[in-house]
Image (cartoon, grey):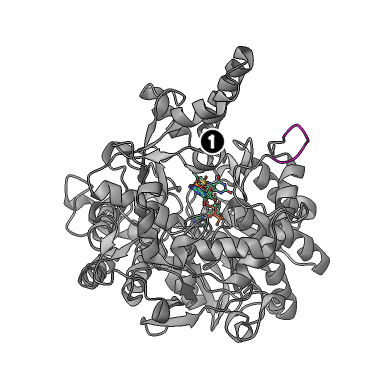
Amino acid sequence: MANFETVIVETDLLILGGGMAACGAAVEAAHWAKQNGLKVTLVDKAAMDRSGAVAMGLSAINQYVGLKDGTNSVKDYVDYVRNDLMGVTREDLVANIARHVDSTVHLFEKWGLPIWKDAEGKYVHEGRWQLMINGESYKVVVSEAAKNALLKDSLGEIFERVFIVGPLMDGDRCAGAVGFSIRENKVYVFKAKATLAAMGGAVHVFKPRSSGEGMGRAWYPPWNSGSSAYFTMKAGAEMTCQEVRFIPVRFKDAYGPVGAWFLLFKSRATNAMDGNYMVERKAELDNWLPYGRVKPVPANLRNYLGMLDIMEGKGPLFMRTEEAIQKIAETYKDDPKAYKKKMKDLESEAWEDFLDMTISQALLWAGTNVQPEEKSSEIAPAEPYFIGSHSGASGAWVSGPEDLQSGDSKNEYCWGYTNMSTVKGLFCAGDASGASSHKFSSGSHAEGRIAAKAAIKFIVDNNTAPNVDQAAVDAVAAEILKPLEIYETHKGETTDPEINPNYIRPRMFMFRLQKIMDEYAGGVSSQFTTNKAQLERALELLEFLKEDSKKLAAPNLHELMRCWENIHRMWQAEAHVRTVLFRDETRWPGYYFRADKPKMDEEKWHVFANCRFDPSTGDWEMRTRPIHRIFA
Ligand code: SFD
Ligand code: AMP
């Protein structure tokens, strides 16, 4: 469009995103870039201090292995992740993060993050792998370090409020990215020798439980809209575990996390009849062996046992906060003063858990007169999210470290630069990389560091400026701005700007996507259950949606961003539906259930299900990849 300026930025390493993985990448890249005289550029759609999943802060660091204490080994962590994901995990990637994550946590502490300590000065654990923090300002602390590293000595540049739409290619090599400012009329073209995608996971692909008045409230942040998945798919990268969505059980309606309650406070969850589904339904776990009998019980199976209660009409489920608090305080009963103090401490810990991380849960408690030491709270499985860093696994298929391969895994899992996707020069970390679950905030930061170091090595070995065709850039820029043009052309044709025969606004488009996914791909309304016929129907309807995505319209830059966010979500949806259809079994009940294939088929499907969109033909390829045990 005539009134838009095109800004061209040339750099060596381009980091996309400003969240936990990107901040880790910035710190590490700065170190290696300085030694090699290279430039690093970071681009975030928001303001780094409060961008991404950690915007509100967190109350725990969920991955800390504690290698120095000698209590846990890297193998212990790999065993934990493999078991939790029902056997489907890349052990090389998980181990690589596990062996580096402690140093990331020590950096956080050095930068000023308060980690709880006991009387002996030791970290207070929430559970075996989790540390308690006073984490309201977690993201501010982490992003300050990243900014300092990049801006010191004018080593790099940071662009905030620039939304990345898609990749720029030089043949089979990623040559950077294209996006636009959400504050100024500017299209940005970033040309880079290597690109690191760390734009988080995807929320609002499925219809959320919170609709209408609660719209926008979700456990994972609504602004993580599938940009990592879209970017890597459009570049032609092979994707993995696109079927492994994550459904967290959360405090109902405000999505407060449950980890502190289950692990720190050791709370029970019970149904309306006071029954504990983890005890009463234990026998069900035998239908999912060998994973049904591991400890802890895999997250999806924990979900599933609770869901069986709900489906049998035994809901709601309750987190027994009052019982847990009373039980801990009971040990102080003989000393009334100590008891009173303990109760006060527990009360403030309970509130701080949410005030540090999910403020709306604290607001909901306050608004509904809940005192957790007196009254239990409802919990419920949330809508599905796509997130490679928590207990889901979706993301790009990336190369693993050479020294952690064993036997055949070397051929299958390692093609040179660690964390590089199957596209040359395109690296991924955090939610963007797949099959390496349970990295959380700390592991994502560590993985960002790992990926950035490898990306700098790639640049040193391939130090040529990419060759980018100007005509292709012009075409992409025009495509990016098309929704503005569509709106301008047709806005006078109806009296209500929401409704127009020639365009669709992003909000309505998102509702359509969510309805398809909810009803046909196993969302909340269909009790997370689907089958082949429903998935095929979903694909048919997604095809119509894709046609209509060409008619998205935007009156301003914010709406333009929403148009592209929803196109990104749509691509994540398609990859998911295709892969759930491809994997002819049910492996993760509690995340989704294939009613036509209700059993796990360990013989045939103990494999990765991968997919790839071919940008040259527009076709999707589905394939399996073997699972190699490295830490047998
Ligand atoms: O309890 C674009 N997480 C928890 N991790 C923990 O370690 N402890 C916890 O206590 C955790 N819990 C938790 C967690 C998350 C949330 C939302 C809650 C509670 C309420 C998970 C971690 O936060 C998560 O694993 C990491 O943050 C993942 O890191 P990363 O880097 O993959 O994603 P990000 O931090 O969300 O950052 C994404 C960035 O990308 C930007 N972005 N930029 C440019 N263009 C685009 N198109 C873009 N799209 C996105 C974003 O702005 C952001 O900067 S608990 O529940 O388990
Ligand atoms: P959550 O708050 O549900 O995201 O959980 C935080 C951390 O605690 C993650 O590492 C979870 O896997 C773990 N976790 C939560 N609930 C349980 C549970 N009942 N048993 C074992 N681990 C859990």
Whether residue 255 appears in magenta in the rendering, the answer is: no
Question: Where residue 108 sits in the image (x, y, percent)?
Answer: 71, 46
Question: Where residue 33 sits in the image (x, y, percent)?
Answer: 76, 65
x 26%, y 54%: residue: 527
Name above or below for residue 536 compared with residue 264: below
x 67%, y 67%: residue: 96
Residue reaching furthest to the right: 35
Q: Which residues are magenta?
A: 118-123
x 31%, y 51%: residue: 307
Q: Amino acid at mark 1?
A: Phe
Name above or below for residue 574 compared with residue 294: below
Q: Is residue 387 visible?
A: yes
Q: Is residue 489 left or right of residue 127?
A: left
Question: Where residue 135 sits in the image (x, y, percent)?
Answer: 61, 38
Q: Nearer the viewer, residue 417 or 624?
A: 624
Quadrant location of the C terminus?
A: bottom right
Ligand 2 neighbours mark 1 (CB distance < 8 Å) = no
